Amino acid sequence: MYAGRVNLSLLVAFFLTLTAQEAGLHSESTELFRKIWSPYCKGVSLLECPSGQAQQLRDELRDRLSKGETSEDLMRELYSRYGSTTLQMEPPSTWQGKLSYLAPWIALFLMAFALGATWILRRKNRKSPSTSNETRPRETSSRNADSILRDLEKLKG
């Protein structure tokens, strides 16, 4: 009776181990299928492609994963077979790509800096309002007086 319980518990442990391994394999394969476009259905991940060829490819990849190949090895082999433009869902991160995302923010920062510097310099170079207001009316009043005097002399003469 005791030997039967041990055998039963070993059998349950074996099946639980297999189930855990299958679950890990399933999640790894699902993640791999989500990462790449299907070569048979344009614009659809390999996971969602309903094509029979895609199903065969998924079965082949699951089989190879179960035999111990890594996802990275399978990705390299798929890229060499189908090409990176066909399979790759996420573009590789390059410095040009990062710069294209940062360029508008850099331009905005530089424009704000230039605008602020211009504003500060104009405020510094501006004369005080009392000095500029006093000189202008005197100049205009003396010009007006001179022109009025000339006009009067023309009328007299």
Image: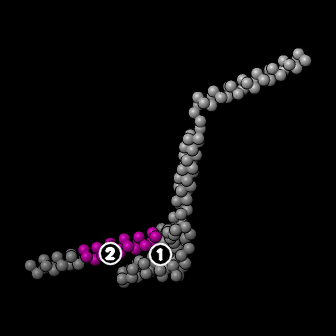
Q: Main secondary structure of the magenta part?
A: helix
Residue 108, visible in the rendered structure: no
Q: Quadrant of residue 20?
A: bottom left
The extreme top residue here reads 156
Q: Position of residue 145 (x, y in %)?
A: 76, 21
**Which sits earlier in the primary sequence, circle 1 or circle 2?**
2
Residue segment shown in magenta: 16-35
Q: Is residue 131 toward the left or the right of residue 24 in the image?
A: right
Across the whole image, how many numbered discs are drawn on residues? Answer: 2
Give me the disc on residue 46: none
Residue beneath label 2, please? Answer: 22
Crowding near the residue tagged with mark 2, few <14, some 14–19, many ≥20 C-alpha atoms within 10 Å = few
The Cα atoms of the two marked residues, 1 and 2, are separated by: 18 Å
Give me the disc on residue 55: 1
- Is disc 1 placed on a helix, strand or loop? helix
Q: Amino acid at mark 1?
A: Gln
Can you say whether 3 is above or below 94 in the image?
Answer: below
Q: Amino acid at mark 2?
A: Glu
Q: Residue at coordinates 56% horizontally, 40% vertically from top-left?
A: 123
Q: Quadrant of residue 85?
A: bottom right
Q: Is residue 62 toward the left or the right of residue 103 in the image?
A: left
Q: Residue at coordinates 52% horizontally, 59% vertically from top-left?
A: 102
Can you say whether 73 is above or below 35 in the image?
Answer: below
Q: Nearer the viewer, residue 141 or 98?
A: 141
Q: Is residue 75 toward the left or the right of residue 155 in the image?
A: left
Q: Is residue 65 toward the left or the right of residue 125 in the image?
A: left
